[in-house]
Image (spheres, rainbow, N blue to C red):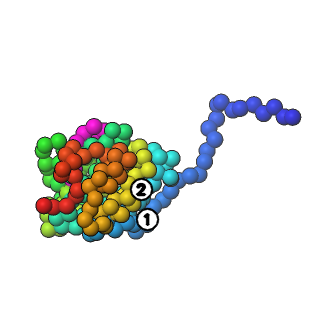
Amino acid sequence: MTNQKENYFEDELENNASIIKPNEGEKLELNTISITFKVTSEMSNDQLGVYEIFLPPMAIGAKLHYHRFMDETFIVDEGVLTMQVGDKEFPAEPGTVAYVPKFTPHGFKNDTNEPVKLTLIFNPSQKREGFFKGLHETLSEVPIDPEKYLKLYNKYDSFPVDTSNMIPIRD
């Protein structure tokens, strides 16, 4: 029996990088909104989720909500995104980075007649892909079941500030 000594002084290098090109990644269509998974929970051991979001004119991404366990970062790539943080709204032009730590109420939408493309980052990701897939199912139902929507939200660390105004549709 060989007694192999553990090496405490040298790193063991690995080649686990993922390169995701512009039109690559699993794409979900939620009515007129699309979400493309770029870096998934599985790839990052649940540490990071990176998603490309496309919002057509006048689309709502999410109404005011917060997360208990994850931070969210928005990077606006194209168009003007309306960000809501607390009770204030502001326009976020291309190049804007909005970092939203846990317990910070926030929402986002496209209030313009032009499409918006953004990169959304969750840290940790907490299997966020399941949330987006559940959203696809829930928002495809007519009528949308608020109880099912809330159950999905809560399972994936999302908590609406106002449960009577949480479904991402315009009144």
Q: Is residue 13 left or right of residue 155?
A: right
Q: Nearer the viewer, residue 4 or 72?
A: 72
Quadrant of the snapshot with the N terminus: top right
- State the image coordinates of residue 104 (x, y, percent, origin top left): 25, 39
> Element under label 2?
helix
Residue found at the far right of this picture: 1
Residue 100 drawn in magenta? yes
Q: Disc 1 marks which residue?
A: 26
Identified by mark 2, the residue type is: Glu
- State the image coordinates of residue 32 (x, y, percent, origin top left): 26, 69
Please indicate, yes or no, whether residue 92 appears anywhere in the rendered image: no
Q: Is residue 170 left or right of residue 158?
A: left
Vertical placement of 86 versus 60: above or below? above
Please tell me whether mark 2 or mark 1 is closer to you in this view. 2
- Name which of mark 2 and mark 1 comes first in the sequence: 1
- State the image coordinates of residue 60 (x, y, percent, origin top left): 21, 59
Quadrant of the snapshot with the C terminus: bottom left
> Element under label 1?
strand
What is the CA distance from the residue labelled 2 to the residue labelled 1?
10 Å
Q: Nearer the viewer, residue 134 or 19?
A: 134
Residue 77 drawn in magenta? no
Q: Which residue shows up at 18% across the image and 67% down it? A: 57
Vertical placement of 122 versus 52: above or below? above
Q: Which residues are magenta?
A: 99-108
Q: Is residue 84 left or right of residue 72?
A: left
Q: Disc 2 marks which residue?
A: 129
Q: Which residue shows up at 44% across the image and 50% down it? A: 127
Question: Could you classify mark 1 by the number of other residues whose Cα lies within 10 Å: few (under 14), some (14-19), or many (20 or more)?
Answer: few
Q: Which residue shows up at 14% across the image and 68% down it? A: 113
Asked if labels 1 and 2 touch by Cβ distance under 8 angstroms, the answer is yes
